[in-house]
Amino acid sequence: MNFARPITATAEGLGYQLELLGSVIVRLYAVPARARLIADQIYQSALRTVHVVLVVGLFIGMIVALQTGIELARIGQQDQIGTIVALSMAREMGPFITATILAATAGSSMAAELGTMSVSDELAALEVLSVDRVKLLVLPRVVALAIAAPLLTIVCDTIGIIGGGFVAQSQLNVSYQLYIDSAVEALRDPAHILPLPKDVYGGLFKSVVFGVIIALIGCAAGLRAQGGALGVGNATRSAVRDAIIAIIITNYFITWALYQQ
Amino acid sequence: MSAGPAPRAADRASGRPDSEPVIELRDVVKSFGTQRVLDGLSLQVPRGQCLAIMGASGSGKSVILRHVIGLLRADSGIVSVEGRDIAKLKRRELSELRKRMGFLFQEGALINWLSVGENVALPLRENTSMKDAEIRERVQAKLELVRIPDAWNKMPSQISGGMKKRVGLARALITDPEIVLYDEPNAGLDPEISQSINELLRELHERLHVTALLVEHRVRCIRTVADEVLFLEKGRALIQLPPREFFASDNPRLVQFLGTDPD
């Protein structure tokens, strides 16, 4: 067995994704001309996923409230649940859960769409017609997810905090008003300079980065797909797997950069 | 029904053929893994001529077209178009050269999320600063040329294989190319639609005087459209003759191959 092969393939894949990122950056001037395609992609990736984000976000908020609330109740600090749920949703859970949902839905869909185009000669046709496929196919998808991911993260944060409130009131005997007051207080900038604290901006910044990563990995996997339906299946699977790994690794480094003491 | 060979395109065009080849392959070698597909192939297509390439399935016919359009690079040898070595062209130069070429893919290769009209309009929208009205006028003219004037708003998933070929042809011709490459324009079509496509190709050849490379199995198509026929065997040109002489040849391999032809 050749042990170097997976390492070489990973390095090649990463190199291709970085090259694609560079190609997208130098074509950002074309964003206004692609407004319609970007809007289509936002619809495909965000609006058609919002119900999933609502359900998952609601239950994640409820789980966080329940898990932390039980422990806080033992030491009589259950009125802090609002603070903990709000901060954990804004900092970590919202961006991460949203990114995971987007990787599984929009990322896999991008890999499958472009992969099908690749194996059915549509990408070759674009090349033959001298049509810039990065500008036509990749740029709109990357920009769309960079916009959609933070919007969906706001939805996820909000519904998660609301879900935590249900649990706080119904199972931990914390009044809904007290829960909301502590959540709102936690999401206020202590210095009262910015409308929201670093926790919220940090989470939204993460989600923009995650959106770009998911779209790039999905597009790269699709563009490199070969070998018919099997190749499209492999591209889709690798797009979701690689995006989730990349999100977790990137999440650590962004968190480290934002919150290191 | 066409029985004999078509007159040479350049003769039809009003003059003698230009002696300098527009498309030239010299000693081209191409392997995929351990399989050598092209093994020192050489061929020339003079201006205004249509050269058909015949050969067994998997003999590398489509690979030749993909070399000429720059989708594949030869392991060795030279592929040149208009005297320019494709392998030495920079990306931008290759892109400019491709704008003067048309390529009809075997399955049409239409972009499945664009309508028929937008598929044909794509090169104009992406590569020119033409206004929408002008683009619509040109696209409509090409749709009429390939005899599907009412197809603009149809999606690729809603049209038949023959219609996809016509749309692919309209898209290949939208920039009025000087060179057109056809990859099995008859593949998967019934005899009636095949013949209408063949007659359409001949008509285009006569009207637009393009230089063409045609990959095809069907004898009827080659008789209708081609000026010369090359038989590809084991990655090399076994024989190259005008259609009448080609189909009358007593070359044993050719006789064996043509004996199985469904036409």
Image: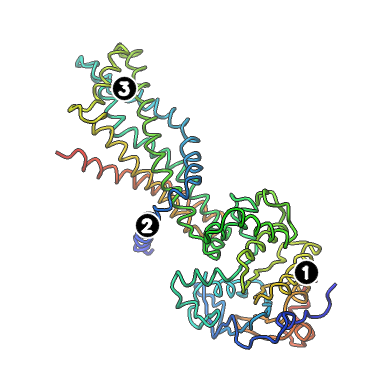
How far is disc 2 from disc 1 in space, using C-alphas?
46 Å
Q: Chain of mark 1?
A: B
Task: For mark 3, name the chain.
Answer: A
Tag on residue B199? 1
Q: Chain of mark 2?
A: A
Q: Is residue A238 visible?
A: no
Image quarter of the N terminus of chain A: bottom left
Badge 1 element: helix
Q: CA distance from mark 2 to mark 3?
A: 44 Å
Residue lying farthest to the left in this orientation: A261
Seen as rendered, the residue at the extreme right is B1
**Residue A38, horizontal then vertical, whole percent:** 47, 45
Quarter of the figure with residue B45: bottom right
Does residue B93 sit above or below A134 in this rendering?
below
- The quadrant in which residue B178 appears is bottom right
Residue at image point 40% right, 56% down = A27
Q: How many marks?
A: 3
Q: Given this view, does label 2 or label 1 mark the residue nearer the observer?
A: 2
Tag in front: 1 or 3: 1
What's the residue type where badge 1 is placed?
Glu
Q: Are marks 2 and 3 in contact (CB under 8 Å)?
A: no
x%, y% of residue B8? 73, 82
Q: State the residue in front, B153 or A180.
A: B153
Q: Which residue is mark 3?
A: A65
Mark 2 sits on what residue? A26
Give the mark nearer the N terminus: 2 vs 3. Answer: 2
